[in-house]
Image (cartoon, rainbow, N blue to C red):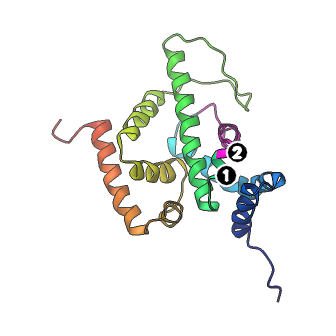
Amino acid sequence: MQLDVIEPWGEVTQLLHAARGGDGDAMNRIVPLVYEDLRAIASRKLRREGRERAMRPTSLVHETYMKLSNRAVLRAGDRAHLLAIAARAMRQVLVDDARRRSAAKRGGECECTTFDDRVRLPDVGADDMLALNDALDELEPRQRQIVECRFFGGMEEEEIAESLGVSARTVRRDWVKARAWLYRALYGSASD
C-alpha cells in the first residue's frame, strides 16, 4: 500500500499553494487537472440554454481561461474554490457574448473573434442573458455566488458549500431565495 499517492483534487490544492509560494510551473500543472471539469461545466451550461450558439464548450473554457488572471486563480484555496471562480468568469464570458449579439441586432457590425471559427448565428436569448446579469447584480453577494456556481458552473450544493465555507443547508436556503427573487425580477409576480 502506497501512502504517498496524491489524490487529483488534493494535488490541485497543493499546486495552488505552491503557485502562491512562487512556483511558476505549478500553474501550468493545474490546468490539465481541472480542464475536463471546466469543459463539463461549460457543456452543461450551454446545453441548458437549449439554443444553437456560436460558442462550443471548448471555446467557452478557453475564453474563460483567457478571462481568468493568475491573480484570480491564486486566490483559490482548493479545487472547489477554483471552479467557483471559473464559474463566475464563465458568466462574464457568456454575458459579454450576449452583449455582442445584442449589439449586432441593433446594427453593431463589429467582427467577433473567439477560439472557434464557427459563424455566429443570431440568438434570441441575448436579451434574456443581459436581463439575468442585471438581476444577478441586485442579489446579495452570497446568493449571487451560489447562482453563479450552480447555474453557470454546474456545481452541486456540497461543492458550493465547500467553496464558500458555509453549510449545504445554507446553500439550499439561499438558492431557493435567489431563485424566487430572480423569477420575480425577470418575469414579475403572478399578479402582474
Residue 110 position within the rendered picture, expressed as x and y whole percent measured from the top left = 62, 13
Residue 23 position within the rendered picture, expressed as x and y whole percent measured from the top left = 81, 55
Give amino acid for label 1: Leu
Q: Is residue 162 above or below residue 53?
A: below
Q: Which residue is at a point 70% across and 37% down the rendered structure image?
A: 66
Verify CB contact (< 8 Å) between mark 2 and mark 1: yes
Graded by Cα atoms within 10 Å as few (under 14), some (14 to 19) or many (20 or more), the crowding at tag 2 reads few
Prevailing secondary structure of the magenta residues: helix
Q: Residue furthest bottom?
A: 1
Instruction: Identify the secondary structure beneath mark 2.
Output: helix
Residue span colored magenta: 53-71
Q: Quadrant of residue 55?
A: top right
Give amino acid for label 2: Asn
User: In the picture provided, is 165 more to the left or to the right than 53?
Assistant: left
Res 173 label? none
User: In the picture provided, is 38 more to the left or to the right than 50?
Assistant: right
Does the magenta run of residues contain 82?
A: no
Q: Is residue 7 above or below residue 151?
A: below
Graded by Cα atoms within 10 Å as few (under 14), some (14 to 19) or many (20 or more), the crowding at tag 1 reads some
Residue 89 position within the rendered picture, expressed as x and y whole percent measured from the top left = 58, 42
Q: Which residue is at a point 60% across and 51% down the rendered structure image?
A: 41
Res 74 label? 1
User: How many marks overall?
Assistant: 2
